[in-house]
Amino acid sequence: MTQPSVLVVEDEPAQRAVLTYNLESEGFRVVEAENGEEALLLVSEEAPDVVVLDWMLPSVSGIEVCRQLKMRKETQALPIIMLSARSEEIDKIRGLETGADDYVTKPYSVLELIARVKSQLRRSRPGAMAGRLQYEDIVLDTENHRVTRSGEEIKLGPTEFRLLTTLIEKPGRVWSRELLLDRVWGREIYVDTRTVDVHIGRLRKALSKHGGEDPVRTVRGAGYALG
Ligand code: CA
């Protein structure tokens, strides 16, 4: 199961550390950004599942980051939870219609914030919270590590299983080879990007073993997508 990930954008190191510590204890992978520019860069590089975004940031403000993310087609659906220092500012934020998905006022309870993160995650990545993922006739059971297609059992190696889990969580999303390497192999290990092609080939073969069209789409110059 690929870990759900959260991008924490907060300029105060102590607050960032508290958030990271608590989110990691809950099983999230945490990516940290200390300012808006870094946040925008990391969203493209890391493809987080949820963003926790402080409003008050040096130079590029949280509102501006939120506005930019909601404008880009690839990140429009990415859930953003805004952190704001004073309650009266919430009305202001709402008035500005930044498009944030949720707001939390500082000082906040970490437990409540985590509950909000989970609730956003249930929307953006249902598979991370459930044991069963489905795309058309392909069903992946994350708890029992089983895959079936039209009811027929599909045998997959551990790498192909993780690849399929990543792809099936976001059908239609185009994954670059680099991003798949990070998600499936982990970034500590050096693996050539061509390895991804090899395992995609194996996954395709396995999925079509009992018939059915190849569900994996090659996007030239970009990577792979399911459907
Ligand atoms: Ca701040």
Image (spheres, grey):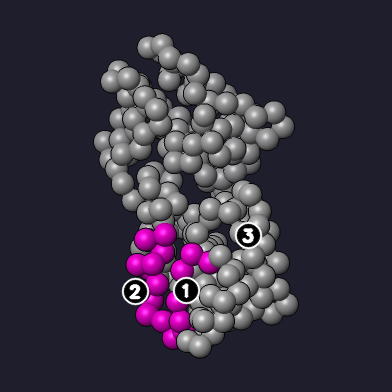
Q: Position of residue 74 (x, y in %)?
A: 62, 48
Q: Is residue 115 part of the magenta span, yes or no?
A: yes
Residue in the picture at 57% in, 77% down: 95
Residue in the picture at 57% in, 26% down: 217
Task: Estimate how packed mark 1 is, as few (under 14), some (14 to 19) or many (20 or more) residues with alpha carbons within 10 Å.
Answer: many
Residue type indicated by callout 2? Leu
**How many numbered discs, if any?**
3
Residue type indicated by callout 1? Tyr
Q: Does 30 appear above or below 176? A: below
The residue that mark 3 highlights is 69
Q: Give the foreground label among 2 and 3.
A: 3
Residue in the picture at 58% in, 70% down: 97
Q: Does 4 appear above or below 139? A: below
Task: Estimate how packed mark 2 is, as few (under 14), some (14 to 19) or many (20 or more) residues with alpha carbons within 10 Å.
Answer: few
* Whether residue 190 is visible: no
The residue that mark 2 highlights is 111
Residue type indicated by callout 3? Leu
Q: Does 68 appear above or below 199? A: below
Q: CA distance from mark 2 to mark 3?
A: 26 Å
User: Who is closer to the viewer here, 121 or 110?
Assistant: 121
Q: CA distance from mark 1 to mark 3?
A: 16 Å
Q: Which residues are magenta?
A: 100-120
The residue that mark 1 highlights is 103
Quadrant of the image for the N terminus? top left
Residue in the picture at 44% in, 36% down: 168
Which comes before the other along the chain, label 1 or label 3? 3
Determine if the C-beta at disc 3 is less than 8 A from ligand 1. Answer: no
